């Protein structure tokens, strides 16, 4: 068993746990010594200790566990929760701890628990020790096409982690609220547009299939065991933190590089491909809102607006005062086979039930990304795109 290591100062909870155990064990032993017929079972004592700790914890700072904390969504979600006064703890595999540096100054404000996400026992111990009020399961490969290279690994990371965490919450007996990061990739080869919570799922890649498996696992545990677990079916959401492998960041980095004379052209695939793109900072807000609701429900989250890759390119280059037609070269070899279908969200339910609407427009989002890439290039903190 790989186990886990948590660097967390929580003396109040530890002291309370120690005192409760001491008194209850003494009472238990005294009952046995005097032959009482009402000796409570040890399992009852353990559950009583956890219940008292949970009540005590509610009057303290809320604790949120986040898997995938070093990714784009993990960053913005951590930022949001810290502003709300949470204690934020990232569950990070031991071999991925170097990625914590990607969080920049935010890393000093959160706590990291090194744990193997494939180890059920270790995750159970983490959940029992930390007693979180909320868990946000964002763990997934960062780039969808990569899932074809390791379908089983993708399945275990996405579905396995969700299953192990949900099981841990249930076994420990907590009232933890659980958020599962689902994806529009679950809809896949859609036969209707826009899509809502009732649209059939038809995933077209291992990533979408794994997300769907995790989604149904969460639904089944909610239905069978009464867990407060919900799913956000999120459409494409971007930010300056996106890796350059994503088309939005590929374009904004290229536009900034061309503006500074660091490259001459940008090679692109299908400019007519369309996506429902939103801002990641807006989307983590609705993740949090889902866990504050009275009842756990699943929501489709997107802008409800389609923009083409050509729109993306045009806006990015215009932000730099450039005519995109002079620099962009279309290469048919870069066309993707899954670009014939259109994923478009119908977020009516989220607006109606949670009062959520995206705040940052597509134009403002792309401008944010281009200007940030321009700043990075000027300071030398990143290299210009070369392809």
Image: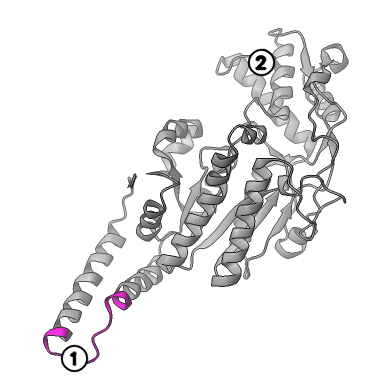
Residue 33 highlighted magenta (yes or no): yes
Determine crowd level at label 2: few under 14, some 14-19, many 20+ residues with C-alpha closer than 10 A.
Answer: some
Magenta stretch? Answer: 32-45
- Which residue: 62% across, 28% down? 243
Q: Earlier in the sequence, mark 1 or mark 2?
A: 1
Query: At which x and y percent is residue 208?
Result: 68, 45
Q: In this picture, is 98 found above or below 24?
A: above
Q: Residue 26, located in which quarter of the rendered image?
A: bottom left
Query: At which x and y percent is residue 178?
Result: 54, 59
Query: At which x and y percent is residue 270?
Result: 84, 26
Q: In this picture, is 251 found above or below 211?
A: above
- SS at badge 1: loop
Determine crowd level at label 1: few under 14, some 14-19, many 20+ residues with C-alpha closer than 10 A.
Answer: few
1 and 2 marks in contact (CB < 8 Å): no
* Disc 2 target residue: 385
Query: At which x and y percent is residue 164?
Result: 48, 55
Which is nearer the eye, 300 or 145? 145
Which is nearer the eye, 27 or 133? 27
Which is nearer the eye, 268 or 146? 146
Q: In this picture, is 162 found above or below 342?
A: below
What mark, if any, has residue 93 been given in the picture? none
- Which residue: 55% across, 18% down? 381
**Is residue 12 something one can see in this rendering?**
yes
Residue 109 lies left or right of residue 315; in this view the side is left
Q: Quadrant of the C terminus?
A: top right
- Which residue: 22% across, 92% down? 37
Q: CA distance from mark 1 to mark 2?
A: 76 Å
* Residue projecting furthest to the front: 152
* Disc 1 target residue: 36
Counting labels gives 2
């Amino acid at each position: 068993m790989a186990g886990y290591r948590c660097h967390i100062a929580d003396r109040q909870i530890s002291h309370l746990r120690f005192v409760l155990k001491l008194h209850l064990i003494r009472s238990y032993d005294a009952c046995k010594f005097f032959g009482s017929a009402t000796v409570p079972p040890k399992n009852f004592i353990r559950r009583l200790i956890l219940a008292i700790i949970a009540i005590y914890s509610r009057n303290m700072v809320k604790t949120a566990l986040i898997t995938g904390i070093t990714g784009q969504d993990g960053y913005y979600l951590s930022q949001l929760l810290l502003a709300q006064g949470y204690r934020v703890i990232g569950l990070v595999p031991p071999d991925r701890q170097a990625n914590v540096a990607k969080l920049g100054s935010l890393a000093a404000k959160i706590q990291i628990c090194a744990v193997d996400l494939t180890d059920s026992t270790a995750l159970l111990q983490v959940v029992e020790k930390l007693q979180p009020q909320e868990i946000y399961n964002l763990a997934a490969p960062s780039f969808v096409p990569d899932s074809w290279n390791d379908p089983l690994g993708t399945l275990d990371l996405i579905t396995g982690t969700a299953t192990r965490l949900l099981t841990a919450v249930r076994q420990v007996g907590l009232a933890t609220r659980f958020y599962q990061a689902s994806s529009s990739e679950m809809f896949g080869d859609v036969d209707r547009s826009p899509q809502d919570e009732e649209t059939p799922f038809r995933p077209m890649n291992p990533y979408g299939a794994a997300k769907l498996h995790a989604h149904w696992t969460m639904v089944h545990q909610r239905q069978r065991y009464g867990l407060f677990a919900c799913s956000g079916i999120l459409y494409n959401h971007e930010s300056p933190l996106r890796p350059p492998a994503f088309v939005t960041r590929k374009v904004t980095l290229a536009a900034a590089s061309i503006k500074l004379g660091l490259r001459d052209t940008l090679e692109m695939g299908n400019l007519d491909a369309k996506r429902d793109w939103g801002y990641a900072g807006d989307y983590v807000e609705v993740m949090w809102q889902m866990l504050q609701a009275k009842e756990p429900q699943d929501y489709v989250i997107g802008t409800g607006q389609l923009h083409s890759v050509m729109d993306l390119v045009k806006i990015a280059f215009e932000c730099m005062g450039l005519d995109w037609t002079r620099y962009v070269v279309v290469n048919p070899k870069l066309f993707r086979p899954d670009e014939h279908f259109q994923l478009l969200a119908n977020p009516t339910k989220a607006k109606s039930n949670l009062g959520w609407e995206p705040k940052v427009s597509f134009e403002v989002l792309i401008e944010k990304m281009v200007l940030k890439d321009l700043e990075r290039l000027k300071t030398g903190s990143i290299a210009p795109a070369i392809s």
